Image (cartoon, rainbow, N blue to C red):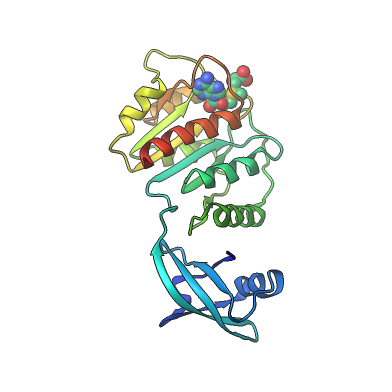
């Protein structure tokens, strides 16, 4: 079934008014007609089964037939901090982390990342919305602007639990099993993954000083996108189930 985004304030009684770019998508792109049933995602944790009742100039009126809780919405607050990777890997991650129920993806600069990230905010927003519709969430993954390493440290120091994927085993490194054990009661979680070049020793130390726990994802060195998806999948699937 066709899915469209609306905002809670677009609701008028037992109808939604679909307008702006959502209307363009509904009418001009997907050629939706009066009488068709569609699903609306209003970002309020519900899915609305609706019927298009009227198409006017620049907007459509859509009658609510049924509303239900959206079980595909993330129940936890997982933020992934990913040191900006090369090429289109960030777009791949954006899609996979959407499917895995991450709330926010924050790219950051580190010593071994490219220095000037391109501003692709509009493209990322569009990709996150597409991924959101594909996997059935009602609120897209939020993609933050690329922040500095220092800003990332400041943010994680305020998070309930932060885990840092680090391939070098330290005295206090956690195994995956330890990490999941520590996470049991947490609701606000941050995960940190490096880019292709990883982190310098100085950076790793400051991440630990900011309160993160180092986690080993095994004896093999994973590519950054593998590490990011694997770590997120473990945390998200374990906690959601
Ligand atoms: N610094 C390394 C190098 O250049 O050989 C590897 C960096 S690795 C390709 C990219 C990121 O993935 C790392 O910064 C880390 O966050 C994560 N990672 C890869 N393998 C890992 C492992 N076995 N355990 C924990 N994290 C890992």
Q: Considering the image in quadrants, where does the C terminus appear? A: top left
Is 27 or 81 nearer to us in this picture? 27
Vertical side of 59 occupied by 119: above or below = above
Vertical side of 175 occupied by 195: above or below = below
Direction left: furthest residue: 185
Is residue 55 in view? yes
| Residue located at (48% from left, 22% from top) | 217
Count every numbered label the image shows and give the total: 0
The answer to which quarter of the image holds residue 115 is top right
Place of residue 3 in the rendered image (x, y in percent of width and height, measured from the top left): 56, 64
| Residue located at (54% from left, 34% from top) | 229
Is residue 199 in view? no
Place of residue 85 in the rendered image (x, y in percent of width and height, measured from the top left): 64, 35
Left or right: where 46 falls relative to 85: left
Place of residue 100 in the rendered image (x, y in percent of width and height, measured from the top left): 49, 43
| Residue located at (42% from left, 72% from top) | 66
Place of residue 110 in the rendered image (x, y in percent of width and height, measured from the top left): 58, 32
| Residue located at (60% from left, 32% from top) | 225
Vertical side of 222 occupied by 40: above or below = below
Ligand 1 is found in which quarter of the picture? top right
The answer to which quarter of the image holds residue 117 is top right
Is 72 or 165 nearer to us in this picture? 72
Is 213 or 10 nearer to us in this picture? 10
Q: Considering the image in quadrants, where does the N terminus appear? A: bottom right
Is 133 or 168 nearer to us in this picture? 133
Left or right: where 90 falls relative to 43: right
């Amino acid at each position: 079934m066709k899915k469209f985004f609306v905002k809670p304030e677009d609701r008028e009684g037992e109808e939604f008014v679909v307008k702006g770019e959502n209307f363009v998508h509904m009418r001009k792109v997907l050629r939706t007609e009066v009488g068709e049933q569609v699903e609306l995602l209003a970002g309020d944790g519900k899915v609305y089964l609706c019927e298009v009742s009227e198409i006017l100039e620049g907007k459509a009126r859509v009658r609510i037939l049924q509303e239900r809780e959206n079980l595909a919405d993330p129940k936890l607050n997982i933020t992934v901090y990913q040191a900006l990777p090369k090429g289109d890997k960030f777009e791949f991650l954006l899609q996979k982390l959407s499917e895995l129920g991450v709330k926010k993806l924050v790219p950051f600069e580190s010593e071994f990342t490219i220095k000037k990230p391109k501003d692709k905010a509009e493209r990322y927003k569009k990709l996150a919305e597409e991924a959101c519709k594909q996997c059935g969430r009602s609120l897209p993954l939020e993609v933050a602007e690329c922040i500095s390493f220092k800003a990332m440290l400041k943010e994680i120091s305020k998070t309930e639990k932060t885990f840092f994927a680090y391939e070098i085993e330290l005295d206090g490194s956690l195994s995956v099993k330890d990490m999941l054990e520590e996470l049991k009661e947490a609701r606000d979680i941050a995960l940190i993954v490096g880019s292709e070049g990883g982190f310098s020793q100085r950076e790793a130390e400051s991440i630990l000083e900011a309160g993160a726990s180092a986690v080993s994802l095994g004896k093999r060195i994973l590519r950054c996108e593998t590490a990011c998806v694997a770590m997120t999948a473990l945390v998200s699937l374990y906690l959601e189930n």
